[in-house]
Each structure stands twice: as structure tokens, then as C-alpha cells.
Image: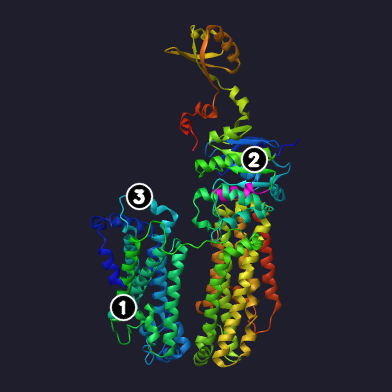
Amino acid sequence: MAPILEARQLEKSFGSVRALDHLDLTLDSGEVHGFLGPNGSGKSTTIRILLGLLRADAGTARLFGADPWNAVSLHSRLAYVPGDVNLWPKITGGEAIDLIAGLRGGADPARRSELLERFDLDPTKKTRSYSKGNRQKVALVAALASDVELLILDEPTSGLDPLMEREFQECIREVRSAGRTVLLSSHILAEVEALCDRVTIIRQGRTVQSGTLAELRHLRRTAVVVVCDGDAAGVAALPGVHDVRRDGEKVHFTADDDALPPALAHLLPLGVRSLISTPPSLEELFLHQYGEDDPSRAALSGGR
Amino acid sequence: MNATLVADRRDHPAREEKAGSLTGALSLFRFALRRDRVRIPAWALGVGGMAGYFAAVIPLAYPDQAALQTRANIMKDPSGALLTGPGYGLENYTFGAMVTNEILGMLAVAAALMSIFLITRHTRAEEESGRAELIRAGVVGRRAPLAAAILTLLTANAAIGATLAAGLLGSGLAFPDTLAVSAGMALVGLVFGGVAAVTAQLSEHSRTASGMAGAALALAFLLRGIGDSQSVGGSALSWFSPIAWAQQTRAFTDLRWWPLLLCLSLFAVLLTVAVVLTAHRDFGAGLLPARSGRGSARASLVHPVGLILRMERGSIAGWSVGLVAFAVLTGSMGEGIVESFEAQPQLAAVFGQGAGGDVLRATLASFTAYFAMAVAVYAVISVNRLRAEEADGRTGAILAASVSRPRWLLSSLLVTTLGSTVMLLLIGIGLGTGAGMSVGDPALAADFALAGLVYLPLVLGFAGLAALSYGILRGGTWWVWLILVSAIIVGLYGPLLNLPDAVADAEPFGLMPRVPAESLDPVPVTAAALAALLLIGAGAAAFRRRDLEAG
């Protein structure tokens, strides 16, 4: 089946600034796809090319199999939440929701009022009086209440409080079980880890990793802390086991993905009393991607 | 009322809090001056330049006492007084008397507008945007932002007063009277700055605050106009208007100072009210509750045209009301203008009119062209709003829904066309009705009802230029304004400027047939319509090809 969204070798420059440099991104039907990258790495530029708002200098972009530059009619099959939601003055939040949803085909009224309640949004307030979080909610309600195949969400939770963020995650799970496709651009790793089937990590306009979370975890070592009756420090002799360190009766080590079974086989006869195994978090993957040849990126750490 | 409020305030126990409520005002004042370092000098130069301009032009247009007396006769007419002043010194009209009677009112309105914008910009707009929150979180007292805004207001009005005085003194007018006129203008500015300081406390939104203050200014303008048109020297009604107080100094005729005390007292009262109100409200809150609106949209809004119309309707209504009011007033002066043209053929030449024929119809037809210039300005401003929509990211949201770029651009142009049509219709009807009332010829209203529409293709041509500039975007709008403003200047002052015939003939407003004084020549109108279509088509094509800037 053809991908819902596809970008191949996309290039885009703004003057002398190279925003996209051979970027690849593929979204299959029914998946929630995380689109990760630090600020200014080209996430929004990619999305705006896929929406036909910008034209790529080179490479191919495909939206539902068509060229997005001439595909306005396809927009009725998708909903978009921009990263920085700006609403029209003089109208209310409710009117803004109906406007955004209505221009692409309309919202389900029951779903709309349910979402207003869940996101605790007063639709009778004028848009000027809304905070950033409330403006974000307007765009989210308009998107989630629409019956569309594809949701394109550009950092949708910036400005939402933790309760609302939890509600948002619940909504995305419902969207996924309804079989819709989601592109979730974010730098909040916990959110991506909780929601996404696959992720694409980009940096300076270039795709550096793409795959399922499990595949990406292959690339990093699992951290293990073990307490044994015998001396566990002997695992250091096994290939693929690193950073062995003793801390009282605990022994810490890290193991490559394929070194884990032999390491456990080595430990079990020694009488394991306690064992904690921590798979690499997305945060570690992320820091690994950005940290190694650019130390300044390490400051990015926890997302927001 | 003032006294009670102040007494009320004294009852509050927190003395030390009061001492600190102005902390930081001076730093904020310096910051405000820095932010306005271009605006205030620009206003001052504009006001001084206007004084210099009139000083240079009026002796040319009214070279001798007879000519000045002709002018004075127009001002004796109630419709003349409605737009200008109470009419002191009409028996022996001089340039100075003209300044007090005709120009001061206009300058006072300008000073009032400057002051309203200044105060709202530095108080409520800052609070609404959240920037003032950063400021107030520092060591800054509760009343410091208002105090800094008031200091800026004083500075700005002092600056425009000084340049006006310099301009008038430069043309040889007497010092005490010049001082009275300049101080009068600056004091009217202060009064309306004070009004804005109060309305800024009332509403949460800066637009509502400046709107309320602007309504107060419109009321003052109306009261003075109606009051002054009742009798020479003004009537009791005039005295309810601060603008009248400035004119009532009778500068250059029979100077008296005390009316200016009224301005000062009202300013003091307004300031006290604003200061007291500041202390009685929360940061960011207004004293009037914000109204809530509809929870869901009517179907008419969910459409590009509906949305743009909703955003534009306030501005269309404002322009329409202003234009129709001026059209009726201009029309009602028609008879006086015709008389002065007959007495003064050189004045008629300035307005591009020869003697003979139906002078009134020909004159009104020329005025229709001047009003059409204003509609062209509206059309360009209206199309230019697309730029702000795009920069704020809202256009991106529309285009990400199922709205194509040509549809968005054409929807916007449709609203501009609608607004321009309404305005041009109202202008014709207004001019005809006003003139019809003044000369007792009701047929004029019907004759002029459609006259304005002759200019619709030309107005749309300028909208098309703006659409093309939006389609290209990067080129800016300056060239559109350059073309429009040149056309307006040549159209208005062409005969005065002694331009080569080729330039004067190319002025597009002059190319349109002067309906109903002339017959409707379809050639220039059709040519303008074709040009409009071509420009709009080119604009849509350019917009389709380029990247969107934001959103």
C-alpha cells in the first residue's frame, strides 16, 4: 500500500540558510509517527512543504500519493495543528473551531462538544482573551473533531498543562484505534515514546534515524544492575558487555542488544537475588544522536 | 466627584504602599521616549509642516482682502461653520483668524488622535500583550506605567505645540496669539489623552479602549460643529466640546486666555479619575466585563468571503460613515463654493473648473473624483491586510484546509470590491443629497446616486496593484503607494503645480468621465476595468507560485 505521506531527498533553502538537506520521511497508513528534532532542524519546513505552503527546491513530496503543491482538494482528508496557533480577532473560540473545521468539510457536533468538555475550553470567549494553551486547544478540538484520515500535528502540546497533555495522549490513542494516521512533530520525548509506533529523527534538515522504537533501541545498550550470591563482575569477560562497575554488593554494567542473552546465561548460575534492566530511553537515543559530534546539543535534554 | 474619589483613597490605610506606587516611572518614561523616538518627531514635523504649508499656500489662493472676504462668506454659512469653527474675525478676515477658525480645529483633532493612540499604546496595549507583566514584575510601582505614559503624553503635545508655534511665527504671526493657538491644540491633545487614560482602565482590550476615546472625540467634534453652526461665535452647545475651548480663545481677533483653563481643569479631572481607577482594578483586568459571544459559528462565517467580511466589516462601516458624512457636508457647501468660483475664476481654475455651464454639477463631479481617491486608499489598505494575515500565520491555517490560493486572494478582493462599491454609492448619494438640500433641488441626489460607481474600475485597478504586490510579496508595497499618492497629488494639486501636460493628462482619476456633468465615456472606464482584471490575474498567478511566509 502506498504511503500516506512521503518525502524523499527533500531540499529547501531560505536564502543562504539550508533548512532541508536530503530529508526523508515516510508515513504508512494507520501509524502514529513521531517526528523528532531540535528547534530549527526543519520539522515545520517539512510539514509546510507537505501541506503545499512551501515548494521544495529538490526532491519529491507526496501527500496521499499526489504532489502537495497542486493538491488543495486533498486537504479535506487531513487536519493540521500548527505549532504556533494564531486565531482571528473579533470571533469566539467556538466560531474559530467551526471555521477551521468547516473549511475542510466540517466537524462532528457530538465529538466537538465532547472535546470541548474534555479540554475544558469555553467556546464563547473571544479569541483575543485566550492564552497560548487555549489557542492550541482550539486548533486541537477543530482537528480531533474532524472526520479525517490524517492528522498533522506540529508540536501540538506546547502550552498545554500536564492534565491537558494526558487528555491529548488519550485522544491520540483513540484516533489510532480508529485506524487514522498521525504525524506528531515534537521534541517532548516522553510524549513520543508514549504514543508513537515509529519515529524519524532529523537534524539540520537531514534524517539521521528512522524506524520503530524497538529498532532504534537496538542501537543503544541496555543498562543492568544485578545483585548475585556469587561474583557477577565476571561478565566483563563477555563480548559486548561494557562499563562494569562494583557498588557495594551491586554490579552495574551495560550490554549491547545481542550481548544480553549470554550475559544473563552467565549470571543465572551465580544465584541472582535482584536484577534491574533498563532499556535505553528515547531521551538517551536522542542525546546520543545529537550529543556525539556536537556537545552543545546535550543541553537540549528533556525537551521543553 | 473628583473630590470624593480622592477622599476615598485617603481612607485607605496603606501609606507606604502609596509612596512606592510611582517607583520606576522615570525609567519607564525614558524607555517610552526611546520607543517613540521616531513617532513623536514625525508628528511634530507633520504639524509644523502643515502650518508652514498653509502659510505658504493661503496667500497664493487668497491674494487680497476681497478674496479673503469671499472665504469668510463661506464660513458664515452654517455648513461652513459645521466643519471649521465659531467664526470669529469674519468681518475682517486675516490669515491669523483663518488659522484659529479653520485650521486649529483640524490640528486639535490630529493632536487628540495622536494622544489617544499614544496613551493606549503605552498602557492597555502593553498590558494586553503581556509585556507589561514583565515590567511590573520588576521594581515598578502600580501607577508607574500610567505615570510614564502621561509624561510621554506631555512631551509629545509639547513637541507638536512647539513646532506649530515655530511654523506660525515663521509666517509672521503675532506671538501671544500664536502661543494661544499652539497651547490650545496641545491642551486638546492632553484632554483626549486623559480620556484615553480613563478608557484604558475600563476595557481589557486596547482596541475597545481607543475606540471609546475615539467616540468621545467624534462626539466633541459633532457638538462643536452643531453648536457653532447655530450662531456666529458658537452657541451653548459648542461649550460642551473641548475642541471649541481652544477655538474660543479668539486668537488673532480678540485674544482671551481663560477658555484654555477649561482644558486644563478637565485634563486634571480625567487624570485623577484614571489614577484612582488604576488603583481599583487587577492587573490585566478591565472595569467593564468582556462580553462573551457565540459558542458556535453561523454557516455564513465558515467561508473565506464570510470570514474576511467579518474581519473587515468594522473598517468598511467606519470608512463608509466617515465618507458619507464628509460627502453630505461637502455637498451642502456646494452653493457657497459655486458663488466663490463665480467671484474668483482663479480659484475655479485650482479645482480644474472653467466658468460657464452647470458649475454646481461640474464642481460636485470633481469632488466625486476626490472622494474616489479616498476609496482607492481604502482598497489598497484592505488588500494589504492580506500581508498581516499571512505574517501572523492565519493564512497558512486557511490554506491547510481545502481553500486554494486563488480562491483566498479572490475572496479577499471580492470583499474589497464590495466595500468600495458601498462607499462609492454612498459618496454619490451623500454629495447629491447635501447639494440638493442646500440649493433646494432634490433631483441632484438622483443624478449623483450612481456617479461614484464610474470610479469603481479605477479603484479596483489600485486594488489590483496591491494584489500584485501581495502576490510578489518581497517587493513591498511602497511602489503601490507611490503610484496612488502621485495620482492623488497630481489630481488634487495638478493645476497648481504647473506640471507638463503629459503628466497631468496621465493622472487616472482625471481620465474618468466627470459624470453626470459629462456623458459617460465608456473607453476610459473599460480600460480601467481591463487593467484591474489583468493586475488581479497577475497577482493571483504570482501568489500561486511563491512560498508562504509563515504558518
For disc 1, the chain is: B
- Of the residues shown, which amino acid type is indicated by label 2? Glu
- Of the residues shown, which amino acid type is indicated by label 3? Ala
Give how far across and how far down residue A175 sits, in percent.
65, 41
Residue found 55% across the figure and 40% down from its top: A166
Q: Is residue B214 left or right of residue B194?
A: right
Residue found 35% across the figure and 72% down from its top: B191
Q: Is residue B546 visible?
A: no
As drawn, B40 above or below B77 = above
The image's colouring method is rainbow
Q: Mark 1 packing: few (<14 Cα in 10 Å), some, or many (20+)?
A: some
| Range drawn in magenta | A136-146
Of residues B502 and B238, the one nearer the viewer is B238
Q: Earlier in the sequence, mark 1 or mark 3?
A: 3
Q: CA distance from mark 2 to mark 3?
A: 42 Å
Check disc 2 and report the residue beneath it.
Answer: A174
- Of the residues shown, which amino acid type is indicated by label 1? Leu
For disc 2, the chain is: A
Check disc 1 and report the residue beneath it.
Answer: B262
Check disc 3 and report the residue beneath it.
Answer: B137
Judged from the image, the secondary structure of the residue bearing numbered disc 3 is: loop
User: Which numbered mark, 2 or 3, is in the foreground of this view?
Assistant: 2
Give how far across and how far down residue B341 sits, in percent.
52, 89
Of residues B441 and A112, the one nearer the viewer is A112
For disc 3, the chain is: B
